[in-house]
Image (cartoon, helix red, strand yellow):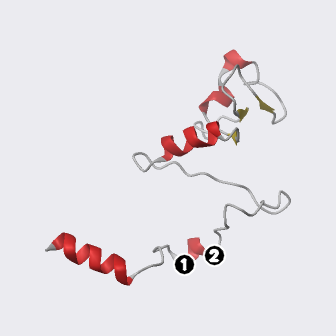
Amino acid sequence: PQLRRALSWLDDHKRPIVNPAVRNHMKPLTRTPDPENETVLFWHIPKSGGTTLKSIYKCMKKTLSVRVGADPRYGHATDKEIVAFEPGRMGASFVNVDTLTPP
């Protein structure tokens, strides 16, 4: 009965439920951000598919800002400027930003 109710509810609500305050700041993935006014943010929520998404981005040869970027063995952890680099044969590039440590 609960599953049937949930599926019925989903049928009645075709649009995803997103807080209006958040929805006003969301942009389609097909639109290139304006670097002068916008910052792209990927918010990784554990157990929500974020690791899978990061793997897909690597396959698509996108630039990621993840733990690899701040790893000292790649030689960019102490750079004064933000740079994108390709470590080894991963296919993707990474930004030398430590996304885990608060400023």
Callout 2 crowding tier (Cα within 10 Å): few <14, some 14–19, many ≥20: few
- Looking at the rendered structure, the secondary structure element under dot 1 is helix
The x and y percentages for residue 24 are: 63, 76
Q: Nearer the viewer, residue 97 or 95?
A: 95
Q: Residue at x 81, y 36 (%)?
A: 82
* Amino acid type shown at disc 2: Asn
For label 1, the residue is 20
Q: Is residue 74 above or below residue 56?
A: above
The x and y percentages for residue 75 are: 75, 18
Are the residues at dot 2 and dot 1 in contact (C-beta closer than 8 Å)? yes
| In this picture, residue 31 sits left or right of residue 17 | right
Q: Nearer the viewer, residue 16 or 74?
A: 16
Asked where in the image residue 58 lies, by quadrant, the reply is top right
Q: Is residue 4 above or below residue 82?
A: below
Q: Residue at x 83, y 30 (%)?
A: 80
Q: Is residue 74 above or below residue 27?
A: above
